[in-house]
Image (cartoon, grey):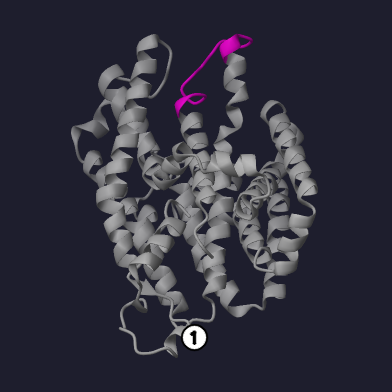
Amino acid sequence: MKHVSQLDGVRGVAILLVLVYHYVPCQLTPLHGSPLYYGCRALSLTWCGVDLFFVLSGFLIAGILLDNRDTSNYFRVFYFRRACRILPLYFLLLGSFLWASASSLATSPSFRWLFQDPLPIWSYATFTQNLFMGAAGHCGPHWLGITWSLAVEEQFYLVVPLLVFLLPRRVLLGVLIAAVLAAPVLRAVFAGFHTFVNTPWRSDSLLSGAALALLVRWPPFLAAVQRHRRRVLTLFGLLLAGAALMTWRPALFGAFNHFWLAGLFAVLVLIAFAGLEPRIVGWLRLPFFVWFGQLSYGIYMFHQAVSGLTHGLLRQSAPQMQKPADLGVTALALGATLLLAWVSYRFFEKPILRIGHRYQYDHPTKSAEGPHTSAPGGNHATPEACAVSEVREAGRG
């Protein structure tokens, strides 16, 4: 699959939603019935940026697996590249938390928000923190609270490569659809905080993206999508209207909230991938969204820690906007987060990504063309192939 630039824009939309949620509704406590109260209510669904990340990640990761399932180094290259993408920045964040925990910051009331409600540190190293979060009923220290979604994705990486490798495509599609349908049932039957952070209860988002990746590789499906373009766009409009209703009446959707959002974002990814609506595709290709999409992983990893440190240092409190000065501190935290994410991507993440993409999947047709250099993940890739794959696998997907 060639690089589709508008999917970078989709990722940019996802991280912008997450930023808005954590930096606006989560920091404001307006009076009930005030204009600001209704403004916060209008932005209350922006937490769904994580759902969009999950759908896009499922689509991209499953697509990579499907395109390379017949290679001899299928598992090695996949996990080597995923490790290069996810682990360095993740363990940098974890290391910074450990360093800060051993300093005076951890005992200062100004920074309590970043360190309160600790969880076993080994759970973060093993990507099982979401299990402890579900049992505890909270996301632990805010410095690392956002990592629950990485745990969900890492657990996704353990299962889906095996399914793609072992199952015929028709059977695989049936399994994915069954798992997507089972997720809201699980949330309804086994309710609780764990339904937000534990993988089986959140599988409708990731696996709907994976199912879409399978469908777009079936030419009759894409042909039908192009033929019924207006119906697809109408479906998107109806799903979007439902999301607007969910913003004001979330109880109406109950356990089906993530299921509805999974459908909405899967259709959005389909529209972007297939180019069904030129205006939407054009917006997603704007440099603004693409830039945020490229930096999304660093932004996601840093934004809460930077916010807590900035507010604790300058306002001696948890992140909040109650006075005009607080707004300036939040804006400063946002600027620092974006700068840090850009530096991280340019000088830390990209060099490691290049290491991961020195190795190609060893396709049988390529093997027949001549000798290749063996390596941990396969044969060396061309710079052009590295560039395309790097952008495609960049960000959290």
Chain part drawn in magenta:
23-36
Total marks placed:
1
The image shows residue 165, relative to residue 93, as above or below, that is: below
- The spot of residue 386 in percent (x, y) is 37, 65
In the foreground, 294 or 160: 294
**Is-magenta flag for residue 33?**
yes
- The spot of residue 242 in percent (x, y) is 74, 35
- The spot of residue 138 in percent (x, y) is 49, 39
Instruction: Please name the residue that numbered disc 1 is placed on.
Output: 365
Q: Is residue 284 left or right of residue 305?
A: right
Can residue 198 be seen at all in this image of the molecule?
no
In the foreground, 328 or 382: 382
Q: Quadrant of the N terminus?
A: bottom right
Can residue 397 be seen at all in this image of the molecule?
yes
**Is-magenta flag for residue 392?**
no
Residue depicted at x 39% and y 44%: 295
